[in-house]
Amino acid sequence: MTPSQVVITPSFRREVIQTAGRIIQFTIVYCIMVCLGLALAAACVWGGIMVVIGIRNFLALMLGLGIAGLGLMVCFFLLKFLFTVNRTDRSGYREVTVAEEPALFDLVRTIARQTGTDFPKHIYLSPDVNASVFYDSSFWSMLLPVRKNLVIGLGLVNALNKGELRAVIAHEFGHFSQRSMKLGSFVYQVNRVIYNMLYDNDGYANFLKSWAGISSYFAFFAHITVRIIQGIQWVLRAMYGYVNKGYMRLSREMEFHADAVAAAVCGGNNLASALEKLPLANACYDEVLTGSNRWLKEGLLTQNFYKAQSYLLSNTPAEEIQDRYRRVTYKDQWASHPATEERTTRLRSLQVNMTPDTTSSWTVFNKYGQLQETITRFVYEQAAIEVADKKWIDGDQVNGKLENDRSADRMPALFNGCFDYRFLSKMTKEQWMTDIPVSEAPIMDEEQASLVYKISAATYDQSILESIAKQEIDADYFEFAGVRYHHSDAEEIIKRIRLEVEGWEHAIERFDLHFMKYTWWLAVQSDSTERLRQRFDRLSRLTEYRRAFTETSDHIHALLAPMREGGDLTFDKASEITSHLKEVLEPSVKKQLSQLVDMSLFAQQETLSAKLSAFLSTDVVYIFNDALNHDAFAKLLDVLEEVQEGLQQLQFKALRTMLETQADLISNQARA
């Protein structure tokens, strides 16, 4: 099977026809608006000239210019997309040449030939899990041939074998390998035209503002121009939704078609395998970035992101990052890509398979170890991080820190995950320090451990259903637990989910209380009651400190929200907000911070301790010379964030310490 033999499916043809019809309708509406705009421009220019000729004074000159300007500005608004080029931001990419990567260029050249496409104009490398084809588009790119650029993400390369990487690149080229696909490019450009006139108007607005600023006469006509443009945009907004929804449906069919082209060239099995690896690749790469960002506070830099990602890929089960407990699915009419499961199902149904090439994808890169480190440094440069005073770490050091970060969220293995990724349920000592012995151990199995994941998944499902119920998500139907429902049933399913969550939360509370009573009984038998009581008291204190501080922090964030959002906030209102912050909330937060410092809670965290000392000893000025001191607000929010993170870490450590004590009690009982 070759790309030219790929069958155009009936659904693809249907979407092409429907989308073409929508484009024709838009074209008719747009041509009418342009004709009216040109007529208005001609009438205004003629009228302006007549005013100037007929009256011949300064006032007539200004009125004539204003009238003519009105028509020309409206006409320019309708045609400005002709002069607009949408340039892709390349700052996060690094271009490579054939001299640097000859094997990569040979691979891409082969795939381009097999898919019947031109070789890319440029090949770029990006740091992330990504592969795409792009070009700088304009209205004229619908009429003139444009060579595309290829982007390959090293985070993707790191997760795929050579056969899978070839299939992914072939999919990207597949978008441009068939003549029937040219409609997609045409539709995209029409969409850009509408978007340009609706939303991409900063330059035009500034020009209009400058014109209005020349004279009060021009300001009057600029105001009329704005009103006319708002009427044009009202029509375009309706057309945008109508055309764009059709384009999204066509776009999904185009993805299926590009998948089929890639299958013909590289095997559907290889592309399906690549697609299934993407969630894990993304999760592991993001985990490396999150850890590296955290280690910056220790003055440490990760030398090679991709070695670290490989370590996580080898030590993370795929099912761990796939939420098995989510039950709501729907067809997003505004999604440009189909769901991965739908794509892999179609790919396998094609039954066009090829022998997997399990060679490492890195074999197509020259000196790939050096390249990995270069791109890692490139990420730090893009983030404007100063590296001169920091230490580079790699290999076992990075892997060890990744494992330490993971273990911070996990408790002793004896509990089979029943306490992972959560805190202990709220309770008092009196509830579990009972004279009534509870000598039967709670059941710590996978079902109990799964409750926290079920609650998380149900919360996500509920948010999706709430959006469907409010029609924020445009879906007529959805599936819940494999059963199809109409969008009007969303509220009923939400009620059902809430009841389930309440049941799971009560089950966790019952389990925690049973567990505490049982380990208290074990502590009594082994004369370890004081140690367990002390562990619980420390955990309770830290839980209360964090709760109280979070409450104060939330009040500050809520107070400052209008200032962060900007909008129509006046300086007087900002001053009022700042006064309340300075007089009420700042004293409260400083009092809490002083208590935490006095208890030496952050003594082991030198950077945070120094930051707190500086904050507590400074009289923060939020308004200086009748202007907001944004740096002061930023420092305040930074302190709040770091203290909350520090308290959470201490709370987790206290919980783990207590659970380790209880694990010892259970282990000793088992050996006895």
Image: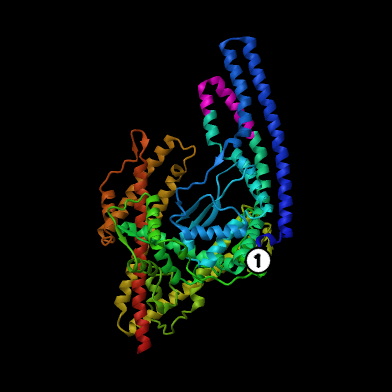
**Which amino acid does the dot numbered 1 rest on?**
Arg
Q: Nearer the viewer, residue 105 or 380?
A: 105
- Taking 537 as reference, is 173 left or right? right
Q: Nearer the viewer, residue 603 or 376?
A: 376
Which stretch is magenta? Answer: 209-230
Element at badge 1? helix
Say which quarter of the image contains residue 53: top right
Where residue 120 appears, x then y in whole percent? 54, 52
Q: Decide if residue 421 is in sight here.
A: no
Where residue 379 appears, x then y in whole percent? 40, 54
Q: Nearer the viewer, residue 270 or 265?
A: 265
Where residue 172 appears, x then y in whole percent? 58, 57
Residue furthest to the bottom in view is 672
Does 218 appear in magenta? yes
Q: How is the image coloured?
A: rainbow
| Quarter placement of the C terminus | bottom left
Does 377 appear in magenta? no
Say which quarter of the image contains residue 599: bottom left
Identify residue for label 1: 346
Total labels drawn: 1
| Quarter placement of the N terminus | bottom right
Q: Decide if residue 453 is in sight here.
A: yes
Say which quarter of the image contains residue 315: bottom left
Relative height, residue 423 to residue 132 (above, below): below
Predominant SS of the magenta segment: helix
For label 1, the crowd category at 10 Å Cα-Cα, with few meaning under 14, some 14 to 19 and many 20 or more, is some
* Residue positioned 70% across, 30% down in the render: 36
Where residue 533 appears, x then y in whole percent? 32, 74
* Residue positioned 73% across, 55% down in the render: 13
